Amino acid sequence: MNNIAITNATIVTPLGHSARKGAAMAELSVIREGAIIITDGLIAYCGSMQQMPEIPAGHARLDAEGRVALPGFVDSHTHLIFGGYRPDEFGWRLKGESYMSIMERGGGIQSTVNATRTASAEELAEKARWFLDRMSEMGVTTVEAKSGYGLSTESEMKMLDVIESLAADPEAKLRIVSTFLGAHAVPKEYKGRTGEYVDLIISEMLPAAKGRARFCDIFTEKNVFEIEDSRRLLRAARDMGFDLKLHADEIVTLGGAELAAELGAVSADHLLHVSDEGVRRMAEAGVVATLLPLTAFALKEPFAPARKFIEAGAAVALATDLNPGSCFSGSIPLTIALACIYMQMSVEETITALTLNGAAALGLAAETGSLEVGKAGDVAILEFDNYHSLPYYVGMNCVRTTISCGRVVS
Ligand code: NIG
Ligand code: FE
C-alpha cells in the first residue's frame, strides 16, 4: 500500500525542483505540527496539521510525535555492485602505501575487476541487496549505482543487468539510478594502450549501454584517463544521449572540474584537489559539485573545499562513494558529521546537499529530494525532534522510519 498520512511531524525540507545553489542551500522550510499525506506514492499534502484536509480512506497512519521528517536521502555516487573485498589493501594504506601506487602495481580497482568478472549476476545482486538494506535503514530512498568493475563489454553489461534487476524488483526499498563507468580504469589486457581501450568503449560499450544507463562517468585522473582521453570519451557519450559525470581532481589537480564545466556535465565528483578556476567554472556552468567526505577521510586526504563552492554560488551535493577500495563505507551519519565538523558546512546546507542537490545530481530534482506536493513520498523520520541531532549524534544512525514512495520500508 502506497497511501500513508504522517501526522504531528516537524517537517524540515529544502524547497524547489532544481539544485539549490550557494547561499540558498542553507534555506530550509520548517513546519512544526505538520502533516504529510501520501497518496499512490506521491505527496498530496504537506503543510500544517491545522490546514490538513481530511485524511482520505485507505491511508495508513503514522503519528511522528513531533519528530523530524526529512526528504529521504539521495546517495548520488556509489559503486554498489562489486565482487570480492580488499581489506589487505586497506592495511597497506594504513602502513603508508598510496592508493595510486597499489593501483599501478595491479591491485586496487583491477583486483575488484578480477573478482567481479568471475562472480555471477545473482551473486553480485545478493551482495548489493545487503548494502541496499543498510542504506534504507539510514533513510536513503534514492541511490545511484555505477558499473565499472567489468571493463569488458560483457562484464560491464552484466553489471548493468544486475542494477536493472535490483531497480525493477517490486519489493525494492529504494529508487536506483544506473551509471555506466566503463572508463573506471584501463584493464590489464589494455595496459599501455589507453587510447585503444577508449576506442573500445566508444565503439562497443557505449552503444550497448545506451538506453540502459542514464549517465556516463569516467575516472579522470593522472595516469588513468587524462584530459584528452576523457574529453574524447565524454563527447562521444554526450552525442549518444548520456548525461555526464566525472570523477574529477580526486588525487591530483588535473583540470577535471574545468572539463566538466566545458562539457556541461550534470556533476563532477570528489574534487579534493580542484583548482580555484575549476570551482569558478563549475559554478558558472551549473555543474553540481558532489563531495564525498568519507573517501577523503578513508584516504587521509584533505577534504574538498565545500565552502569555496558554496561561496562561488555552486550547488554542492554530498554522497558516500561506497566502494570496496578507496571508501568501504556507505554511512550517511558519518558523511553528515564529516561535512559539518571538517568541511564547515552548516547542518542546513548538509541536509540540502543530501536531499534536493543529490536528486539534482541524478537529474531527479523534479521527482524527489524535497517534501512538496507532487513529488514522490520519500521521507526519513528521525528519532529526534531537532534536526541538529544529525551531526550531534556523531556517526550514529538517528533515522527511525524510512518511507519510500509512500511505503514504510525500514
Ligand atoms: O570513487 N577513484 C575511482 N573510483 C573509486 C574507487 C574505486 C575503487 O577503489 O575500487 C572512487 O574513489
Ligand atoms: Fe567513486
Image (cartoon, grey):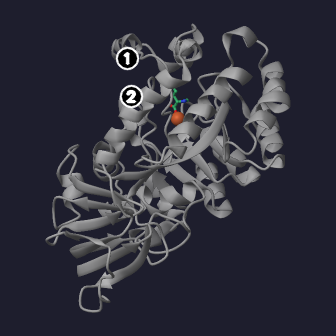
| Identity of the residue drawn at 64% across and 33% down | 181
* Residue at the spot of label 1: 90
Query: Is residue 360 in view?
Result: yes
**Hey, what amino acid is under mark 1?**
Phe
* Cβ atoms under marks 1 and 2 closer than 8 Å: yes
Q: Nearer the viewer, mark 1 or mark 2?
A: 2
Image position of 82 (left or right of 258): left
Give the CA distance from mark 1 to mark 2. 9 Å
**Hey, what amino acid is under mark 2?**
Phe
Image position of 287 (left or right of 108): right
Nearer to us in this view, 365 or 218: 365
In the displayed orientation, state which residue is furthest to the bottom: 51
Mark 1 crowd level (few <14, some 14–19, many ≥20, 10 Å Cα):
many
| Identity of the residue drawn at 24% across and 91% down | 50
Quarter of image, res 29: bottom left
Query: Is residue 28 in view?
Result: no
* Residue at the spot of label 2: 328
